[in-house]
Image (tube, helix red, strand yellow):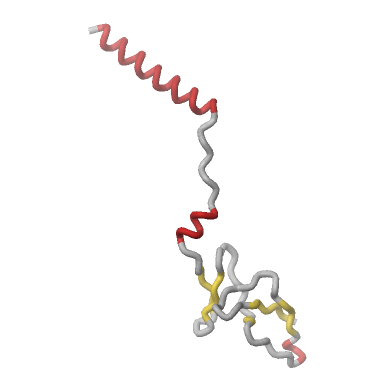
Amino acid sequence: MIWVYKFDDNYIWQAGKDILVDVENGEKIPKGYTDKQPPDGLFIAKYDPQKEEWFEAATKEYIDSLQPDPRPPDDVMMLKKQVALLTLQFSQMQKGGAS
């Protein structure tokens, strides 16, 4: 028994529709399936039957749209930046006042 992986008419992997095929007893791999497992990490896995391999079909824009927005700075980080800025301004004032 081997796992085979389903793809649609556009060769896009249909996750969750993989099946077991008993090739040892002569069962054939059905049309629209391959015994090549899609690699982990693909957002939209697309099969190339000539090369017998999967590749990424998702655009960069699509992948970027799935990423969470960066978190806004929290209060502690903002206070750290303000302290650093005030420290810099204070040291510059001291240097300017000493001349």
In which image quadrant can residue 94 be found?
top left
Q: Position of residue 96 (x, y in %)?
A: 26, 11
On screen, residue 71 versus residue 90, left or right, reads right
Q: Position of residue 12 (x, y in %)?
A: 57, 74
- The correct choice, above or below, for 30 with respect to 93 in the image is below
Q: Position of residue 69 (x, y in %)?
A: 52, 45
Q: Residue at x 64, y 73 (%)?
A: 14
Placement of the C terminus among the 4 image quadrants: top left
Q: Residue at x 49, y 26 (%)?
A: 78
On screen, residue 96 versus residue 30, left or right, reads left
On screen, residue 27 versus residue 14, left or right, reads right
- Single out the residue that lies furthest toward the top: 98
Q: Residue at x 51, y 58 (%)?
A: 63
Asked whether 96 or 17 is in front, the reply is 17
- The correct choice, above or below, for 36 with respect to 58 in the image is below
- Single out the residue that lies furthest toward the bottom: 26
Placement of the N terminus among the 4 image quadrants: bottom right
Q: Residue at x 60, y 71 (%)?
A: 38
In which image quadrant can residue 53 be found?
bottom right
Q: How many marks?
A: 0
- The correct choice, above or below, for 61 with respect to 26 in the image is above
- Single out the residue that lies furthest toward the left: 99
Q: Position of residue 15 (x, y in %)?
A: 66, 70
Asked whether 85 or 69 is in front, the reply is 69
Asked whether 58 or 93 is in front, the reply is 58
